[in-house]
Image: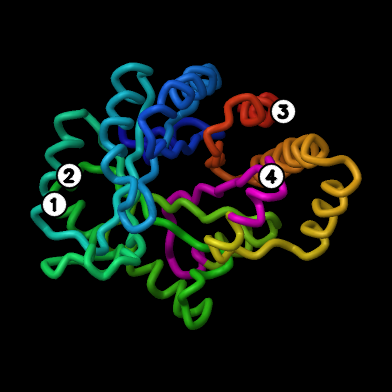
Amino acid sequence: MRIVDRIKSKKPALSLEFFPPKEEEKFPRFWENVQQLSKADPDFVSITCGAGGSGQGNTMPTARGLKQDFGLEVMVHQTCVNSSKKELEKFMQEISETGIENVLALRGDEPQDPAARNSKADFEYASELVKFLKDENPALCVAAAAYPGAHPESASIKEDLHWLKHKVDQGADLLHTQFFFDNRQYFDFVERLRGMGIECPVIPGVLPIFSFNSLRYILSVSGTMIPGSLFLKIEKIMQDEGPDGVLRFGIDFASRQINDLLEKGAPGVHLYTLNRAQPSLDIINNCPF
């Protein structure tokens, strides 16, 4: 089923994000987490690919397992940088054979190793991938990434919004936001989009704070900002109560954040599970899904 249709027919929608392990020996634990989280009956799940395509090899086999073995509606992440049209045509054939009707179209990162760069790459921007996917299969539900605080590489918020609208004009059916920690940022962002004539659903992304170290790492690689007062509070909890205290705080904070988003009209929530079942379930059980 096309996710955009499901979102419009059911509120609030719950989506969960998984990332496939790179090492085969980690897959048994991964599938255990999927089994536990499937009990939450999510409206759909998304499966990531590695930065620069580093994890792309496990993406489709994992997506097939999620759909065929667990009966989950799947959205596959697909990057286009460093890709040829032929490679993406193969991707389209794979998702068609698997029965997947939903794709999150991303630019992706250039490979760090110059030797890994594809001299025959046909795509540079996510908007080009959106157009390609919709041209190949107009019935496909294509989502695009959105940044409430602007993409780290954008020269300005105005420029970022311009290019986001371009992705929608190229055929994006819905938008998934990068995570944020202040809900006012999301609602201000949606208001700006509506003022530009962008009416597609905007699904907010929520990143639970499961550990202080993982939070620092994710912030460093994503370019996302966190309110200084919140970061200092988490740092103090880490000093006073240790990792367990940070986990308890993170579950409570994410639960309150999600409830506030839903109460104020968000069409659903996309939860970054970090492949951790029990704390993610604790959050979900605190919310009206």
Q: How many angstroms separate mark 3 from mark 4 (CA)? A: 16 Å
- Position above or below: 28 against 162: above
Q: Is residue 54 magenta?
A: no
Q: How many angstroms separate mark 2 from mark 1 (CA)? A: 6 Å
Q: Which residue is mark 1?
A: 87
Q: Which residue is mark 3?
A: 286
- From the viewer's side, name the closer residue of 7 and 110: 110
Q: Please name the residue shown 55% across and 60% down the image.
A: 190
**In the visual, does 246 lie left or right of 221?**
right
Q: How many angstroms separate mark 3 from mark 1 (CA)? A: 42 Å
Q: Quadrant of the N terminus?
A: top left
Q: Are marks 1 and 4 in contact (CB under 8 Å)?
A: no
Q: Is residue 212 magenta?
A: yes
Residue 263 shows in this picture: no
Q: Position of residue 231 (x, y in %)?
A: 77, 58
- From the viewer's side, name the closer residue of 8 and 157: 157
Look at the numbered disc 4 and give the secondary structure of its residue: loop
Q: How many angstroms separate mark 1 from mark 4 (CA)? A: 36 Å
Q: Are marks 2 and 1 in contact (CB under 8 Å)?
A: yes
Q: Mark 3: few, some, or many residues within 10 Å (few <14, many ≥20)? A: some
What is the three-letter code of the residue carrying label 1? Glu
Q: Which residue is mark 2?
A: 91
Whichever of labels 3 and 2 marks the residue nearer the N terminus, that label is 2
Q: Are marks 3 and 2 in contact (CB under 8 Å)?
A: no
**In the visual, does 176 lie left or right of 102?**
right
Q: Which residue is mark 4?
A: 209
Look at the numbered disc 2 and give the secondary structure of its residue: helix
